[in-house]
């Protein structure tokens, strides 16, 4: 039997039978199954359920999205038990973006059986599984795993980088209690990688498939070791068919040498967490007492990044690296007159 469904401001399911004049609230609780399908478990007596021909479990089929108030919304499809176009809007907050999930918290309010019994509240956590990615406009999206075709939730605002060099997304929503606008911050814990020219990747910690692959442009191809900084220009599209908002991304760290990796950029992510961005490199020797590194990816393809070290800087910052480079210089003494690239 087909019925209309909705959710009221207290996150209670409302059911409107085909011949009923008004929707009726149904006691129960929401959950999400392993296929990211919304489930409602009825907590009503069997006699009451028989009266309305209702099972103990309702399964809803539709498409997930986050609405303009950042509430979780399911737009229902047409089936034998539900009408296309009905919307189930769960009011709450996104509380976690960890481990390939979007975790959404709702508070359900239930009125007591009599005026002397106070209203009770129940906290429920709904977890959608999928992967965090970046779309063609460099916006954050969450792709929800489903049997037929995935649902894609797009976070249309601009994201930022916090003091621990992690990606954050700030959004505003209307508080149910005060009706005022409140800010919420989503933090994506992870680390940066530079593995292609004009691309910048952010890998989410503890994830098997979530990462952001951004299209970027170098602010300058020439890097300076004392600055400990890599700058990119990036455009983040706020809406379709509108110009993107350009901003500068700054990655902070220190340059180090490793006998195994060659050259790497060590970044501090706070709380004692350090992570290296590893590079391949070719060395360029010139006449100005300088050693230039042309950075490459793991396939030895150029990244468009160059960094130049003076001999004095190398000697003072990394004596072991200086000795290894000095050995190269001694062997390639003739190359100083014309310049040459040497694999490092």
Image: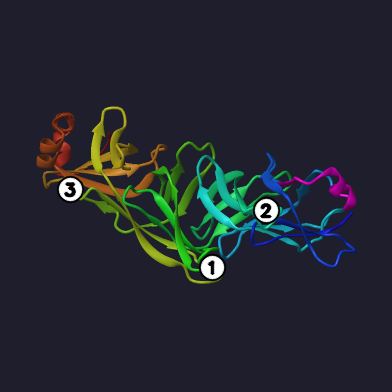
Residue bearing the label numbered 3: 226
Q: Nearer the viewer, residue 191 or 85?
A: 85
Residue 239 shows which numbered tag?
A: 1
Position of residue 344 relative to residue 80, above or below, is: above
Q: Earlier in the sequence, mark 3 or mark 2?
A: 2
Q: Earlier in the sequence, mark 1 or mark 3?
A: 3
| Residue sitting at x 67%, y 49% | 150
Determine the CA span between mark 1 and mark 3. Answer: 39 Å
Q: Residue furthest bottom?
A: 242
Mark 2 or 1, closer to the camera: 2
Are circles 3 and 2 on residues that touch, CB within 8 Å? no
Left or right of residue 24: residue 315: left
Colour basis: rainbow
Query: What is the crowding at mark 3: few (fewer than 14 residues within 10 Å), some, or many (at least 20)?
Result: few
Q: Quadrant of residue 78?
A: bottom right
Mark 1 or 3, closer to the camera: 1
| Residue sitting at x 57%, y 55% | 92
Residue bearing the label numbered 2: 112
Position of residue 316 relative to residue 20, above or below, is: above
Residue 111 percent location from the top left of the image? 67, 55
- Is residue 83 magenta-colored? no
Q: Nearer the viewer, residue 183 or 342?
A: 183
Q: Earlier in the sequence, mark 2 or mark 1?
A: 2
Task: Report the quarter where the N terminus lies.
Answer: bottom right
Determine the CA span between mark 3 and mark 2. Answer: 66 Å
Q: Nearer the viewer, residue 31 or 77?
A: 31
Residue 90 percent location from the top left of the image? 64, 56
Q: Quadrant of residue 5?
A: bottom right
- Is residue 48 magenta-colored? yes
Q: Secondary structure at mark 1?
A: loop
> Which residues make up the magenta segment?
38-54
């Amino acid at each position: 039997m087909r019925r209309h469904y909705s959710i009221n401001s207290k996150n209670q399911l409302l059911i409107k039978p085909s011949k009923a004049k008004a929707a009726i609230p149904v006691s129960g609780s929401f959950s999400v199954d392993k296929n990211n399908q919304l489930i409602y478990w009825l907590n009503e007596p069997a006699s009451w359920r028989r009266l309305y021909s209702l099972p103990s479990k309702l399964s809803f089929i539709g498409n997930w999205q986050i609405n303009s108030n950042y509430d979780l919304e399911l737009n229902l499809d047409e089936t034998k038990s539900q009408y296309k176009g009905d919307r189930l809007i769960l009011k709450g907050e996104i509380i976690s973006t960890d481990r390939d999930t979007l975790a959404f918290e709702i508070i359900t309010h239930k009125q007591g059986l009599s005026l002397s019994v106070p209203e009770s509240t129940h906290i429920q956590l709904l977890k959608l599984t999928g992967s965090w990615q970046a779309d063609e406009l460099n916006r954050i999206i969450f792709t929800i795993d489903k049997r037929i075709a995935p649902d894609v939730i797009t976070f249309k605002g601009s994201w930022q980088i916090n003091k621990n060099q992690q990606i954050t997304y700030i959004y505003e929503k209307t508080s149910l209690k005060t009706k005022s606008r409140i800010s919420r911050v989503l933090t994506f814990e992870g680390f940066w990688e530079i593995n292609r020219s004009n691309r910048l990747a952010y890998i989410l910690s503890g994830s098997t498939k979530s990462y952001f692959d951004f299209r970027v442009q170098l602010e300058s191809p020439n890097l300076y070791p004392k600055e400990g900084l890599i700058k990119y220009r990036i455009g983040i599209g706020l809406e379709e068919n509108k110009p993107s908002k350009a901003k500068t991304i700054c990655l902070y760290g220190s340059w180090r040498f490793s006998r195994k990796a060659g050259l790497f950029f060590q970044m501090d992510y706070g709380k004692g967490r350090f992570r290296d961005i590893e590079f391949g490199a070719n060395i360029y020797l010139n006449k100005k007492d300088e050693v230039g590194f042309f950075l490459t990816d793991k396939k030895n393809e150029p990244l468009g990044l160059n960094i130049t070290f003076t001999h004095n800087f190398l000697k003072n910052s990394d004596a072991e690296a200086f000795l290894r480079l000095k050995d190269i210089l001694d062997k390639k003494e003739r190359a100083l007159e014309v310049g040459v690239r040497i694999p490092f």
